[in-house]
Image (spheres, grey):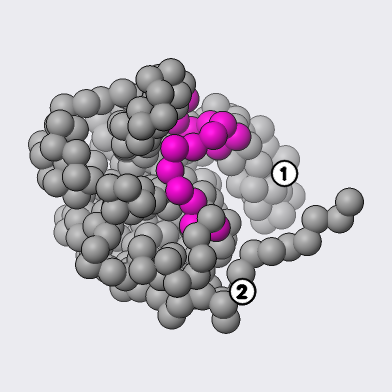
Amino acid sequence: MTVPDRRPSPADLGPVTAAYVTSMGWRSITLHTHISLVHRYVYVEVPKAGCGTMKATLGGLEAARNNPGMAERFQENPHNRLAATPFVRPFQLPPDLLEEVFTSPDYRRFTVVREPAARLLSGYLEKVRQGLKQSEPIIEALRASTGRTLTAQEITLEQFVDVVASMPSRKQDPHWRRQADHIGLGIVDYDAIIHLEDLDASWDRIGELTGTPDLAGQFFCRTSTGARDKVAFEYTPALLAKVAEAYARDYAEFGYPRP
């Protein structure tokens, strides 16, 4: 049986949704947009910016509407995209309702972002140094540019930064994609853009956004590469300058001081 491609084209979507899909691609928006029709909020996930904590916390509360067992399973593995998710995904909504989700004041839209150099380093330490699948395009790019086949563990931070900084956001892996582009900033209006560095103090605000005032202080996922504390050790000043240039919009839009 041949399964037809039923993904909506931009022409079928509302203007904001179409612009966002055109910018970042339908797959990215489907994977990273988490919608609660009950609580009328949209959390747009930024990988490597507290997304495990956010998905476990919010997803656990959404899943608890079904049963405690589902909530526990989701909290234990919030990154498992093959498991059932308690959130509504964009592809499940008709275009008019999806446009409403992205534009209406009846929905609260929010995200969590991170200081760009620390986030980029975290992606490198987890995905490249550990040889995960996200390292494969970096290996291929370096093979094409140098003629050498490196193992993931042989790739230096400088080589990694040079490769990813040369890519447009659409081509970057979401774990180090420019955050302002990833969330469609300037296309989608957000009620809150929370700094990961301030997340501990932001649960009351997230509770307001999600209509769940008992949310404060609930952390179900605390995994970390410790990148924030390793920035000064891992980066040279010259390499930090490359990061600041490549991620200039993130620094400017989110109010982070350039290193």
Find disc 1 in the rendering and name its residue: 148
Q: Above or below — where is 186 with respect to 198? A: below
Horizontal placement of 48 versus 128: left or right? left
Q: Secondary structure at mark 2?
A: loop
Q: Position of residue 72 (x, y in %)?
A: 40, 19
Mark 2 residue type = Ser
The CA distance from mark 1 to mark 2 is 40 Å
In the rendered image, which quarter is residue 8 located in? bottom right
Find disc 2 in the rendering and name its residue: 9
How crowded pointer 1 is (Cα within 10 Å; few <14, some 14-19, many 20+) is rated as few
Q: Nearer the viewer, residue 65 or 213?
A: 65
Q: Position of residue 131 (x, y in %)?
A: 60, 30
Q: Position of residue 12 (x, y in %)?
A: 57, 77
Q: Above or below — where is 245 with respect to 22? A: above
Q: Nearer the viewer, residue 97 or 224?
A: 97
Horizontal placement of 245 versus 170: left or right? left
Mark 1 residue type = Arg
How crowded pointer 2 is (Cα within 10 Å; few <14, some 14-19, many 20+) is rated as few
Q: Main secondary structure of the magenta part?
A: loop
Between disc 1 and disc 2, the foreground one is 2
In the rendered image, which quarter is residue 104 located in? bottom left
Q: Earlier in the sequence, mark 1 or mark 2?
A: 2
Give yes or no for residue 78 being in the magenta stretch: yes
Q: Which residues are magenta?
A: 75-91
Q: Residue at x 38, y 20 (%)?
A: 68
Q: Residue at x 32, y 47 (%)?
A: 38
Q: Which circle marks residue 57 in the picture? A: none
